[in-house]
Amino acid sequence: MFAFVKGEVADLMEGIVIVENNGIGYEILVPSDVVSEVTIGMDVKLHTYFHVKEDAMTLFGFLSREDLNIFKKLITVNSVGPKSALSIMSTLTTSDLITAIISGDSKAISKAPGVGSKSAQKIILELKDKFDTEDILGTAAGFSDGSNQSSAGNSAINDAIETLVTLGYGKSQALKAVSSVEIKDSYEAGDIVSLALKIIN
């Protein structure tokens, strides 16, 4: 129903942003990082999810469409409601959450208030196949010319991650390290591993 809400930030509370648009104040539940990034009086555009149940209608908002899409994926998991999904996204950054899902790190996800170990494991089980290394690497590990990664480039990245895991590093740690490397299209797996090891150490 509401794809986004655009307007001026009228008020801020813990986990809530009130956006004024044409004289109407929209109360929008948001992850904690949104509250820290916006200020009263600034213009914002929040990508929203409208949740309806018998006793309430609630708007959830995110600064990026990517965050909204991840929120929507989280609530497809049977044991995860919108508020639990918001709690997870307030505890972990988007990249850290995807990393935790890909690497099977249920402990990281269960750090979110109200999210138990069983729910975290279920999130990983149901969503793991919906993400790949490109989701976590994104533009952070993109080529220097800003072009999309080639299949050869993706192969080098995946090989580098597997090499780091073989060396004894956790997959989550390997993913984070590789995502921090500024990868050029000429790099082979060994080059990426060398740079990633410098970041880890």
Image (tube, rainbow, N blue to C red):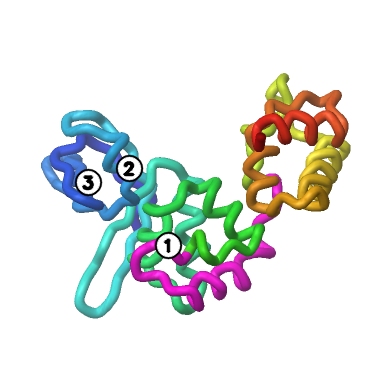
Graded by Cα atoms within 10 Å as few (under 14), some (14 to 19) or many (20 or more), the crowding at tag 3 reads many
Q: Amino acid at mark 1?
A: Lys
In primary-sequence order, the first of circles 3 and 1 is 3
Q: Amino acid at mark 2?
A: Val
Which residue is under mark 3? 17
Q: Nearer the viewer, residue 26 or 74?
A: 74
Magenta segment includes 122: yes
Secondary structure under the numbered disc 1 in the rendered image: loop
Q: Nearer the viewer, residue 125 or 160?
A: 160
Q: Which residues are magenta?
A: 110-134
Residue 44 rendering spot, x and y as whole percentages: 30, 35
In primary-sequence order, the first of circles 3 and 2 is 3
In primary-sequence order, the first of circles 1 and 2 is 2
In the rendered image, the vertical position of residue 162 relative to residue 182, given as above or below: below
Graded by Cα atoms within 10 Å as few (under 14), some (14 to 19) or many (20 or more), the crowding at tag 2 reads some
Which residue is under mark 1? 111
Secondary structure under the numbered disc 3 in the rendered image: strand
Which residue is under mark 2? 34
